[in-house]
Amino acid sequence: MAMCNTLKNTENNIDEYPLVLQLKEFLFNNPNQKEFENWLNYTIYLLKSQDIPLYTFLHRISFINENEETSTTFFHKVQELQIPEANDFFREVRHVVNSNVLGPICFVTPEIGRWSTVGGLGVMVDELTQGIAKLGQDVMVISPYYDRNRYGDTGYLSKDTMGIHKIRNIEINLDGHYGFGVFYGKENGVDYYFLHNFSLFPTPYAGGSCSEVLRRVCCFCKAAMQLLCDLRNIPSVIVSNDWFTGLTPAYGKLHFGPTFKGTYFFHIVHNLDPMYEGRLYPSGGEGTCDHIHQINKDILVDPNGGQTVINPSRAAIMMCDNWGTVSNSYKNELLSFSPLAGLLREKPDPFAFPNGVFKQHRLNELLGKAGTNRVECKRHIQKTYFGYEDINPNVPIFSFVGRITKQKGVMLILEVAEELINRCKQQINILVGGCGNHGDPYFEQCVGKINDLRSKYPNSFWASPNEFFTDGPKVNLGSDFGLMPSEFEPGGIVQHEFFVAGTPVIAFCTGGLRDTVFEFDWNTDMGNGFTFDQHNREGLMNAMERALALFGNKEKYLKARRNAFNSVVDVVDVARAWCREFYKSKDKILFNVKEVLGGEDVAAPNDFFKLSEDQSELVDINVLIGTIDNQPKIANNQRYGSGLIAQGGGVNKTFFFSGECFEHRPGSVSVTGSFDGWKNKIPMIFDEMKNYWYANVSVPKGRCYYKFIVDGEWRCNPKEGMETDLSGNTNNVCDV
């Protein structure tokens, strides 16, 4: 009775009540079905006496409501009960199972997988939908069939091995009559529908006038809804993705009567920077283009006065039932700083979860494309791009893979490259793998800088911005650090592609990078890379110098690579989180529908394989990271740009100089001393969080004299021991 009162009066879970503990015992210790039937019969009787539905009871048990495997076990046991169908008890429990089935989840997306992916959106939706299908859910995708994909290929669907074929035509009316061919294929449990109209969909995100782009958006969104009607398959949840699909909720709710009344419209924000809202600016004679979109202009047009702005993202947020995004940090940034923050805050509980990848699948693919191991990949990079005769494991490789755009922060890499190359005496490799759009002023500026660096430092810097970069897997595996200095990055996939290869990442603290890349801590050996929170040259320079210091300590560096490999967010977890959110939106409990009720088995993604923990550790050490013993030793007195000098027989010492000693932060601080006969001026690194400069140096045992050079001026650290020699020179001193 106490449990029933709790159910009625509070929202707390009831996990510790005897009846619930008995259920846990049944689920985890596999009792016979008769005992489970008796327990269920008694529970239903008790709940009915208090007018409490069985579903409400289950919803309040955390190990049922929050664990897909446990809920699947429960519903499976219910399904196996041998009870006459005429029995009231049978009807009660069957109703709980059947009413908890979510139904189809439909993703409407401008890009998808290998067919039309342009950026992270296409990768995320592709892997998320496959992950949700793997959980036994009914998943479908609707996307354009473009006249040409990003490679310029036509007819690319007909060449695909999936056997995609045309199944029908559909028609819609807006400012005219539009027809579409519908192409269909199925893979990994996902139903794919592609809408073809070569004049409307020439290429992904094709340009044009306001009317042309708006017509493209409107036709695709309305045609997607029309297709569902023609298929007579009305989804339980429809998921739109970014601005190009932003009118999907509006058309579904306003143009098709009550057809989609029971459908929950969810909008995923992949990037809501003002440049990526899909803003359209009508020319003087176009007005607000009402004849094209045929939606109340208050939904679609920004109400800020001045120039008319048609904003599909505004319509998406206003008309969806809820929205979510690809990292918790980015969600908070949007709620605080987005121009659409007011609309975003109107939704009661927006969702966020980081992007991820199929870890083992990517690992298998990575090793298949990249080669046998990390050492071979590093050899390939240094020979192919930097003109080395053979691998030099002591030269670190820093790599960027992605588009050369302002968002990706490539200019920061170019700004620090020359100084780092000179500091390291050209014993460093910096690779920028990617291209951009000609005509983009930022890209053109980067190209000029790239050409200058390549001509000056052919053995230290490489980029070819006019060519599509195809060596991504080898770079992920063979690099020593990945570079992600993005100005903003809502979620990010690239960091996980580096992490899968066991490669630490250097990233600006923004969006999804803030949630997934963590500073390596020398004391705890925690962290999978290095971060900086001021998006400027100095911030990236300091982070790369800290990375160089870590690279100089092979034992610590190996731990960072392990951390990177173990920090990959797996799509299995991503899919479970999003799927649970979709079930929650319909007040249902997530379970594997096909496992309980039967249906087509969902094949794992192509070449997907699962490693045991022992096998994962084996790949981690021997394939991805490589063992220290297999690599040439660091020569005595090998100098790194971080300031670390590795000397045979020395003791590692960290020199410090507190920022409190300066009224204004210096541009550079270095340390020199008797540890190497005063030969080298070793650059020190500034720690933003702790407000001090530091450098790790191998120092011979005994008394050590040293001094600091601050913006060219020789200085002692007043907070450390000092001694004046017979010539009147004052130095810091310590015993090692």
Image: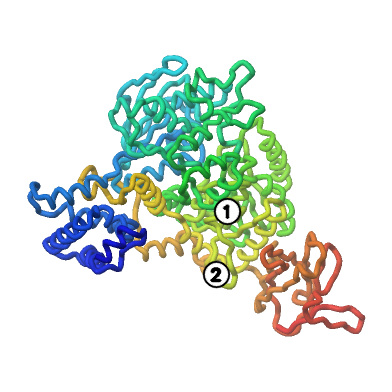
How far is mark 1 from mark 2, CA to CA? 19 Å
Q: Residues within 10 Å of mark 2 (few under 14, many from 20)?
A: some
**Residue 525: numbered disc:** 2
Task: Examine the image and state in which quarter residue 463 appears.
Answer: top right
Left or right: residue 87 versus residue 638 is left
Pointer 1 or 2: first along the chain? 1
Question: Is residue 607 visible in this depiction of the protein?
Answer: no
* Residue sitting at x 18%, y 54%: 78
Q: Nearer the viewer, residue 274 or 257?
A: 257
- Residue 482 - label: 1
Q: Is residue 525 above or below residue 217?
A: below
Element at label 1: strand
Residue 143 drawn at (x, y percent): 41, 31
x then y, percent, for residue 431: 62, 48
Rate crowding at label 1 as few (under 14), some (14 to 19) or many (20 or more) other CA atoms within 10 Å: many
Q: With respect to residue 255, does 643 lie above or below?
A: below
Q: Quadrant of the C terminus?
A: bottom right
Q: Could you tell me which residue is drawn at 20 percent across and 54 percent down?
A: 76
Q: Nearer the viewer, residue 495 or 423?
A: 495
Residue 171 vs 620, above or below: the answer is above
SS category of the residue bearing label 2:
loop
Q: Is residue 263 visible?
A: yes
Q: Of tags 1 and 2, which is closer to the observer?
A: 2
Quarter of image, res 372: bottom left
Question: Which of the image's four quarters has the N terminus?
Answer: bottom left
Taking the view exactly as shown, the residue that stands out farthest to the right is 727
Q: Are marks 1 and 2 in contact (CB under 8 Å)?
A: no
Three-letter amino acid code of the residue under disc 2: Asp
Name the side, left or right, on which 242 lies relative to 596. right
